[in-house]
């Protein structure tokens, strides 16, 4: 039996890619971000992409495009925009219009009647309104007949070379017991975390601002993760170093692997950081370490905001390196400007995390699971 999925707030399609790796057929995606939609179309040629706000998306349109009838869809996935929930947004609250977009997701749930739902968001959703958003999501899905459980998943536990925490809601209306995927990586699992060296060590060296175009991989023995990311590729694209200004280039040589803004001479610090406490801004001007994990990849890999300096080259990480740290395969070509590409990557669900969720769903919806329900 073919299991199908639709991805709302799909962005570039990281969650869709993971679900496809797990064996789901992704029928459609919807997003308001045009560049992300172009990426989705390039990388999911068999799915329909619908550009526009979810408020304008009708259930009738979705059923017409996919050929589905109510109740036939296996999984409806979606991650409403996280800005309203993020700990980086100090004005977050349920009054923010973006915090109510999950109600549009619920409208689609009510119309399509999927067997399963998957929602993903940042951990800051727990603190908004004292947990109001989480309670509302579970209560309103419950009113539609869906049992729902949520759990914080750590991306590094599933082979992603990055510290990234996300809340994943899983629910169904068919009475199958709900659980979340168990970690596959880490000391207790017998499979080590994927390090930054494992992730990007095979990518060619670059100078600040250098663009070598489409280029061959380094002549090294690739790691297991690198082989997975390369697939059948022999050349890599999107590996272009951002151009850092003169003052930033003066700062970088002082920062060792694992170091940060604290290692920069006081006279070279930005004016605002000269007054900072040593305990503040722990990730700013951070240089990665080969044997560590990346910090959370944000929508702007700006060295002023996080640890986005290459472990040994004096430059910021490239779009391709950011994509690798999010576990995007190298055949994923991102559309739009370089700024838009970083946004797409930072907003995405890492495909390997999506695959772990998809693999687990496949187990839950197996005939044995149904029989035991």
Image (cartoon, rainbow, N blue to C red):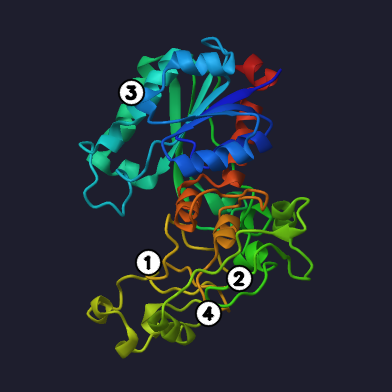
Dot 4 or dot 2, earlier in sequence: 2
User: Label 2, label 3: how many angstroms apart (C-alpha)?
Assistant: 43 Å
| Quadrant position of the C terminus in the picture | top right
Of residue 367 and residue 95, the one placed in the foreground of this image is 95
Query: Badge 2: how crowded within 10 Å, few (<14), some, or many (20+)?
Result: some
Q: CA distance from mark 3 to mark 4?
A: 50 Å
Residue annotated with mark 3: 139
x 23%, y 36%: residue: 94
Q: Secondary structure at mark 2?
A: loop
Earlier in the chain: of badge 2 and badge 3, it is: 3
**Residue at left 78%, top 51%?**
232
Above or below: residue 2 compared with residue 94 = above
Residue closest to the eye, 260 or 149: 260
Find out whether the residues at labels 2 and 1 contact each other: C-beta distance under 8 Å.
no
| Cα gap from disc 4 to disc 2, whole angstroms | 18 Å
* In the foreground, 195 or 204: 204
Q: Where residue 53 appears, x then y in whole percent?
A: 37, 31
Please give left or right for residue 105 compared with residue 193 in the image.
left
Mark closer to the chain start, 1 or 3? 3
- The x, y position of residue 239, in whole percent, is 61, 63
Question: Quick one: 115 or 235, which is closer to the camera?
Answer: 235
């Amino acid at each position: 039996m073919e299991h199908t999925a639709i991805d709302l707030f799909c962005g570039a399609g990281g969650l869709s890619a993971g679900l496809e790796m797990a064996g789901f057929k992704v029928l459609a995606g919807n997003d308001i971000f045009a560049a992300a939609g172009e990426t989705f179309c390039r990388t999911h040629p068999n799915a329909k992409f619908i550009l526009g706000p979810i408020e304008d998306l009708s259930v009738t349109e979705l059923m017409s495009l996919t050929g589905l009838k109510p109740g036939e869809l296996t999984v409806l996935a979606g991650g409403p925009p996280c800005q309203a929930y993020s700990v980086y947004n100090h004005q977050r609250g349920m009054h923010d219009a973006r915090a109510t977009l999950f109600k549009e997701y619920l409208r689609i749930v009510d119309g399509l009647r999927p067997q399963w739902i998957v929602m993903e968001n940042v951990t800051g959703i727990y603190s908004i309104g004292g947990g109001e958003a989480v309670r509302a999501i579970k209560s309103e899905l419950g009113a539609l007949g869906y049992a729902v459980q949520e759990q914080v998943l750590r991306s590094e536990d599933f082979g992603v070379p990055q510290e990234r925490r996300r809340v994943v809601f899983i629910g169904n209306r068919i009475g199958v017991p709900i659980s979340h995927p168990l970690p596959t990586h880490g000391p207790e699992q017998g499979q080590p975390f994927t390090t930054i060296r494992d992730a990007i060590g095979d990518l060619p060296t670059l100078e600040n601002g250098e663009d070598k175009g489409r280029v061959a991989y380094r002549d090294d023995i690739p790691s297991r993760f690198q082989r997975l990311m390369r697939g059948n590729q022999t050349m890599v694209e999107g590996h272009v170093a951002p151009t850092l200004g003169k003052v930033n280039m003066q700062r970088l040589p002082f920062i060792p692997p694992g170091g940060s803004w604290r290692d920069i001479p006081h006279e070279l610090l930005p004016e605002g950081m000269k007054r900072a406490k040593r305990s503040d801004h722990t990730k700013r001007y951070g240089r990665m370490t080969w044997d560590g994990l990346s910090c959370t990849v944000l929508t702007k890999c700006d060295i002023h905001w996080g640890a986005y300096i290459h472990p040994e080259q004096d430059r910021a990480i490239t779009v391709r390196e950011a994509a690798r740290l999010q576990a995007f395969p190298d055949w994923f070509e991102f559309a739009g400007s370089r700024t838009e590409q970083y946004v797409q990557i930072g907003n995405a669900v890492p495909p390997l995390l999506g695959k772990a969720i998809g693999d687990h769903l496949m187990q839950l919806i197996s005939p044995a699971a149904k029989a035991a329900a």
